[in-house]
């Protein structure tokens, strides 16, 4: 409050103000209005407020006999006069103040409003920082510029621009609006690359300051310029920009709502101004079409006498008067008196002389009146008027305007509900909010220079400096990038890809290559990439792996080659052996298969021994028969027709098992004989981790940190190696058991050095790309160019030029792990289980039948002496075994003879 009181010391108040007392319905309810009437906004606002005052008072019953009186004070664009006007209204007991016109004065006068409980309503001071928490008696009756900046940020994101330049006056409204824009852009991975600050609108007397800033902008990278200013300064900016050639093709200009106010109120514009605005995008607060709005527009020429056109702020001025009038009506209808009282804080202060601070009165019903204002719910010229709990206007939206040759045309809308659309926002409010990128639309735009092609939004800075492209000065694997014969020229696979991609970009990219490293050892690539963030390089090109740590600090292009870490180790060939045919099966598989041959043969022998002559005879013959029968089943499927039903069932199941096993064996053997089988104790990254052998890595590669951090391999196990020759020597002499490196390096190593191979699969997936600063638009264009190289086949041609060679019978890429080709028992145990169950069931059925027949037909002969139990069991077992070994036909003949003998011995029946 101290600085406010200092301002008060300049004012000598002449006496106490008059306080309305006694009457419950005052004759007049005074409302102050503070505007600079000589400005465009002030002129339009004054006419609209007077029209609203007349409309309110045209119905004597609306305020119950009272009349609303708007007392306008011309601040003449002077801050001191603005403060005087506010104090004057607070001395004369105004219930509210409309204004001030600028956010600078709103910040000052809101303290007075808070102290004296006098609501201040403004539709032009829309600074986002004018918070209802800090200034509860200040009410913005139009959408805050926070939403304006959100709309601009979404437009920038929609067109794919990543950097903009902000040009604005150094006042609270313009400055805080740009701050809000920066916050909104940051959430969309965009940014303000440069802030061009101009003096206050009221103090600019010549275009010198404007020209200086425009010249700076002209030499910068970004071509998207946001102009947040006032009509007077804005007109000067575009006039000078046209003279400097900045309204030509390639530039993007977005003006805030000041331009639409100018276009609406000064129509037609002078030809000089109209030409300078051509191609500019601007915004206007959206007001839905309605009968009420149409009627007011029709009245405007009569109200203004044709001196000025109606703009959107005239509509908000009219509605603001009605907001106050309705609040006054509600206050009076509640039975409250409009009264004012002295502020104890001021009456006890003495300032010397004739200063009379006690003349400033507190509005006793100010808090109640404020509540009625913020609880307004009405339909005005601007549409639905309602305040949210944070005091922001409901459903903020904007028209998006494109200035063209014959005036301007609307290309779409923005609303806080649905974003960018070509449909009026009020038709979308009843639908769910959809802010997806596919749902954002604007009509075609005529850009500066008359083009309809969306500008790229940036160029290389016009400062004569070439891009400094960092290149690693490699000591090995120079096929990827290397210094040419000790000069500063570079060559290699990565260089050719970069140059080919640059040729596909539609604009020149002046650049020079700068070597990084001493050429004696490979540089550390993390340090190499980090130099982009420090500004040492504008980009880095080379064999740079795209890994997470690096993507946090730079932007990579599309990968131009696939990469990933692999394990390479010494190997020996396994094909050169006469016993290669045994390798399709593992030893357990061979053992179980052989066992089942014997088991199935034994089952068939048991089932067929008593009924089939082929399974009878001397033991040697029967063994040969068993083996031959089960083995020949593999090749002669008709053999099952020579056996019994149970035997046929077992053989069919066994045949099914054999067919599957033999087909798998054949496929595996074919693979083994056609693909080189390589043997090594290192089978992949898993065996590497579990072993205790030392592991080599390339100097400067990220493989070292990856093995330590991700694979938990002890640093003491790691051995740095600098070249392919060191790789081969270390692997052959046992210094390392294996080497972990990126696939392109390993492929190049294996093309020159034989006896090594990749073991297992790639255990990381990544690629190589070129690194640029974060949010660099060149990274996007280079990615598109690399995709173009890939689609046309040029990328493959460059690859073949530098990397396609082989001096070995290629083990790499055609090697096959023996374990992966072998057929293991666990893959077939189900088949063997089925076969075993079939054999068991067949045997069970067979033994059940034979035991049953034995007890039915082999009754023991009656003996005269009763044998002992031991001899009885022994004889029974011998008899059963003899019965089991006896051919079934002989058993039947013997039983038949026995029955005939029994019949012949039976005595004949007497006649």
Image: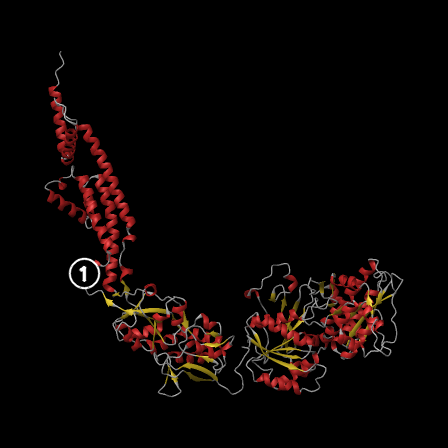
Query: Which sits in the foreground, 442 or 210?
Result: 210
Residue 133 image point, x, y percent? 70, 66
- Res 381 quadrant in image: bottom right
Q: Is residue 299 visible?
A: no
Q: Position of residue 195 (x, y in %)?
A: 61, 79
Say left or right for 64 vs 453. Answer: right
Q: Secondary structure at mark 1?
A: loop
Work out whether 87 lies above or below 833: below
Left or right: residue 12 versus residue 910 is right
Q: Residue furthest right?
A: 22
Circle 1: is it few (<14), some (14-19), or many (20+) Cα within 10 Å?
few
Residue topped by disc 1: 579
Using the image as rendered, state which of residue 430 and residue 536 is in the foreground: 536
For the rendered model, the colour scheme is secondary structure
Quadrant into which the N terminus falls = bottom right
Position of residue 816 measured from the top left corner of the image (x, y, whole percent): 28, 64
Q: Quadrant of the C terminus?
A: top left
Q: Is residue 310 left or right of residue 238?
A: right
């Amino acid at each position: 409050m101290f600085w406010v009181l200092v301002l008060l010391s300049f004012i000598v108040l002449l006496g106490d103000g008059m306080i309305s007392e006694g009457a419950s319905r005052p004759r007049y309810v005074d409302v102050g209005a503070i505007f600079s009437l000589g400005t465009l906004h002030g002129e339009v606002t004054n006419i609209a407020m007077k029209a609203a005052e007349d409309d309110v008072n045209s119905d004597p019953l609306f305020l119950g006999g009272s009349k609303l009186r708007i007392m306008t004070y011309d601040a003449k664009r002077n801050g001191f006069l603005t403060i005087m006007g506010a104090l004057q209204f607070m001395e004369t007991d105004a219930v509210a103040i409309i204004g001030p016109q600028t956010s600078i004065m709103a910040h000052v006068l809101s303290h007075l409003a808070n102290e004296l409980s006098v609501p201040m309503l403004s539709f032009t001071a829309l600074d986002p920082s004018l918070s209802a928490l800090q200034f509860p008696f200040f009410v913005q009756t139009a959408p805050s510029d926070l939403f304006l900046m959100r709309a601009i940020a979404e437009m920038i994101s929609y067109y794919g621009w990543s950097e903009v330049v902000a040009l604005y006056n150094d006042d609270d409204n313009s400055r805080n609006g740009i701050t809000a824009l920066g916050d909104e852009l940051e959430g969309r991975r965009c940014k303000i690359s440069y802030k061009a600050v101009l003096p206050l609108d009221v103090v600019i007397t010549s275009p010198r300051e404007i020209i200086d800033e425009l010249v700076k902008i002209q030499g910068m990278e970004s071509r998207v310029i946001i102009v947040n200013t006032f009509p007077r300064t804005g007109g000067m900016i575009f006039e000078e920009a046209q003279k400097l050639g900045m309204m030509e093709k390639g530039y993007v200009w977005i003006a805030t709502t000041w331009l639409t106010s100018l276009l609406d109120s000064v129509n037609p514009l002078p030809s000089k101004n109209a030409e300078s605005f051509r191609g500019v995008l601007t915004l206007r607060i959206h007001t839905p079409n309605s009968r009420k709005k149409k009627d007011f527009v029709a009245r405007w020429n009569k109200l203004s006498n044709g001196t000025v056109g109606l703009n959107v702020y005239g509509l908000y001025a009219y509605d603001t008067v009605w907001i106050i009038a309705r609040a006054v009506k509600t206050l009076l209808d509640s039975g409250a008196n409009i009264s004012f009282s002295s502020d104890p804080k001021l009456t006890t202060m003495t300032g010397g002389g004739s200063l009379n601070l006690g003349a400033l009165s507190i509005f006793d019903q100010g808090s109640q009146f404020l509540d009625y204002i913020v609880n307004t719910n009405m339909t005005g010229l601007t549409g639905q008027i309602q305040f949210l709990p944070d005091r922001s206007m409901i459903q903020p939206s904007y028209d998006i305007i494109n200035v063209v040759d014959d005036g301007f045309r609307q290309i779409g809308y923005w609303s806080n509900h649905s974003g960018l659309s070509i449909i009026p926002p009020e038709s979308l409010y009843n639908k769910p909010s959809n802010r997806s990128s596919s749902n954002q639309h604007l009509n075609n735009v005529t850009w500066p220079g008359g083009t309809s092609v969306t500008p790229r939004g940036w160029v290389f800075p016009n400062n004569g400096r070439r891009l400094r492209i960092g290149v690693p000065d490699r000591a090995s694997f120079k096929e990827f990038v290397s210094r040419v014969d000790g000069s500063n020229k570079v060559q290699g696979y990565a260089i050719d890809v970069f140059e080919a991609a640059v040729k596909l970009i539609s604009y020149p990219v002046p650049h020079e290559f700068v070597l990084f490293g001493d050429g004696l050892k490979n540089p550390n690539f993390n340090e190499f990439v980090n130099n982009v963030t420090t500004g040492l390089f504008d980009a880095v090109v080379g064999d740079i792996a795209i890994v997470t740590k690096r993507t946090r600090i730079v932007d990579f292009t599309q990968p131009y080659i696939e990469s990933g870490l692999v394990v390479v180790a010494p190997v020996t060939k396994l094909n050169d052996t006469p016993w290669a045919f045994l390798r399709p099966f593992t030893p357990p598989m061979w053992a179980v298969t052989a066992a089942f041959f014997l088991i199935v043969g034994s089952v068939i022998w048991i089932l067929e021994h008593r009924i089939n002559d082929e399974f009878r005879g001397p033991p040697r013959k029967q063994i040969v028969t068993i083996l031959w029968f089960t083995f020949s089943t593999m090749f002669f499927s008709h053999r099952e027709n020579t056996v019994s039903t149970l035997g046929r069932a077992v053989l069919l199941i066994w045949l099914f098992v054999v067919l599957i096993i033999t087909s798998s064996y054949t496929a595996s053997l074919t693979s083994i004989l056609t693909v080189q089988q390589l043997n090594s104790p290192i089978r992949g990254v898993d065996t590497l981790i579990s072993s205790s052998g030392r592991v080599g890595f390339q100097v400067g590669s990220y493989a070292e940190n990856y093995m330590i951090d991700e694979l938990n391999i002890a640093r003491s196990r790691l051995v740095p190696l600098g070249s392919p020759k060191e790789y081969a020597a270390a692997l052959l002499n046992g210094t390392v058991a294996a080497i972990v490196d990126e696939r392109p390096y390993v492929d190049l190593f294996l093309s020159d050095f034989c006896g090594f191979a990749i073991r297992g699969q790639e255990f990381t997936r990544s690629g190589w790309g070129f690194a640029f600063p974060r949010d660099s638009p060149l990274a996007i264009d280079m990615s598109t160019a690399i995709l173009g190289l890939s689609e046309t086949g040029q990328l493959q041609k460059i690859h073949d030029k530098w990397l396609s060679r082989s001096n070995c019978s290629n083990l790499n890429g055609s090697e096959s792990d023996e374990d992966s080709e072998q057929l293991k028992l666990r893959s077939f145990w189900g088949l063997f289980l089925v076969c075993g169950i079939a054999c068991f069931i067949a045997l069970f059925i067979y033994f059940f039948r034979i035991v049953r027949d034995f007890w039915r037909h082999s009754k023991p002969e009656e003996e005269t002496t009763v044998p002992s139990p031991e001899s009885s069991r022994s004889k029974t077992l011998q008899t059963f075994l003899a019965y089991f070994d006896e051919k079934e036909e002989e058993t039947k003949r013997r039983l038949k003879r026995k029955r005939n003998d029994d019949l012949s011995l039976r005595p004949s029946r007497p006649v």
